Image (cartoon, rainbow, N blue to C red):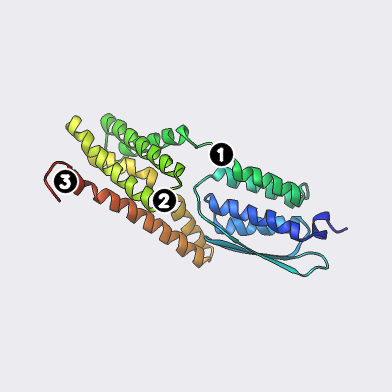
């Protein structure tokens, strides 16, 4: 018996594309997107399901019973990290693979997932950044003053990043200004708290900005033989780290300028 979805193979392309897009745009690995698409396609009764994913796009092809080969291309724009959405897509994929969900039901659920907010949105992400920075400040040789200042600095930087995101500004501006604030605020705090170990404060506050997921994906993709995605994620992580470091290096001359000493 031919599944109902394969009688209209065009209906299967959109949920497959949306599943891969959500995974790619929310911090998932390229191999996970490819595997999810193939498993969902096979669960929908499709044949010759193939998927090729790169960080900027998805290529999908399949053949329904007695039909010609269907091919689709989907542009992917990296947004943010929301692993809750990735987990929900995996849950939908398992249901489709088990034959418990049709293409239309999967599409409806995937659209809901694309609109859902993550558990780390808003104030909780600010609190998490503060806790992370305080812990790393302690690890880097600081004590209670350094932990407190580092947590406050990281909270301010995270709130500033969320504000930029609300105005649809990310990437270069967020990384450079985040690095600048992370390096400048501890030096200003040292004026009020003599003896503050600014190096520990800065190192701790910088850790929430480090592109850890991009570096992890770069290693995973490279080890799996996907050199295009591995190099792309590696360059992304390197450029992000350079922009954060560049913003931090702007702090000393800017402080001297504010004090009237010039560059």
Q: How many numbered marks are there?
A: 3
Q: Which residue is mark 2?
A: 211
Which residue is drawn at the image coordinates 49% and 48% (left, top)? Answer: 80
Relative side of 210 to 21, left or right: left
Q: Position of residue 112 (x, y in %)?
A: 65, 42
Q: Which residue is mark 1?
A: 117
- Vertical arrangement, residue 209 with respect to residue 42, above or below: above
Picture quadrant where residue 183 is located: top left
Label 1 SS? loop
Relative side of 183 to 163, left or right: left
Label 2 SS? loop
Which residue is drawn at the image coordinates 46% and 42% (left, top)? Answer: 166
C-alpha span from label 1 to label 3: 42 Å
Q: Comparing marks 2 and 3, which lies closer to the viewer? A: 3
Q: Comparing marks 1 and 3, which lies closer to the viewer? A: 3
Q: Residue 135: in sight, yes or no?
A: no
First of labels 1, 2 by sequence position: 1
Observer-nearest residue: 230 or 191?
191
Q: Which mark is residue 75?
A: none
C-alpha span from label 2 to label 3: 30 Å
C-alpha span from label 1 to label 2: 21 Å
Q: Which residue is mark 3?
A: 257
């Amino acid at each position: 018996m031919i599944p109902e979805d394969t009688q209209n193979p065009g209906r299967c392309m959109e949920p497959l594309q949306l599943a891969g897009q959500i995974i790619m745009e929310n911090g998932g690995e390229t191999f996970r997107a490819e595997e999810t698409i193939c498993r969902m396609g096979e669960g929908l009764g499709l044949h010759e399901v193939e998927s090729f994913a790169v960080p900027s796009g998805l290529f999908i092809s399949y053949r329904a019973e007695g039909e010609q080969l269907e091919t689709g291309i989907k542009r992917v724009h990296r947004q943010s990290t929301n692993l809750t959405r990735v987990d929900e897509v995996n849950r939908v994929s398992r249901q489709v693979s088990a034959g418990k969900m049709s293409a239309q039901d999967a599409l409806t659920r995937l659209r809901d997932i694309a609109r859902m907010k993550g558990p780390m949105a808003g104030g909780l992400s600010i609190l998490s950044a503060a806790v992370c920075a305080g812990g790393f400040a302690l690890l880097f040789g600081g004590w209670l003053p350094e932990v407190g200042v580092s947590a406050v600095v990281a909270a301010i930087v995270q709130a500033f990043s969320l504000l930029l995101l609300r105005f649809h500004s990310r990437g270069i501006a967020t990384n450079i200004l985040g690095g600048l604030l992370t390096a400048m605020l501890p030096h200003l705090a040292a004026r009020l708290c003599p003896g503050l170990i600014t190096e520990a404060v800065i190192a701790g506050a910088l850790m929430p900005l480090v592109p850890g997921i991009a570096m992890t994906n770069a290693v995973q993709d490279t080890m799996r033989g996907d050199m295009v995605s591995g190099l792309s994620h590696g360059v992304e992580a390197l450029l992000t780290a350079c922009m954060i470091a560049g913003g931090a290096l702007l702090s000393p001359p800017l402080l001297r300028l504010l004090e009237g000493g010039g560059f």
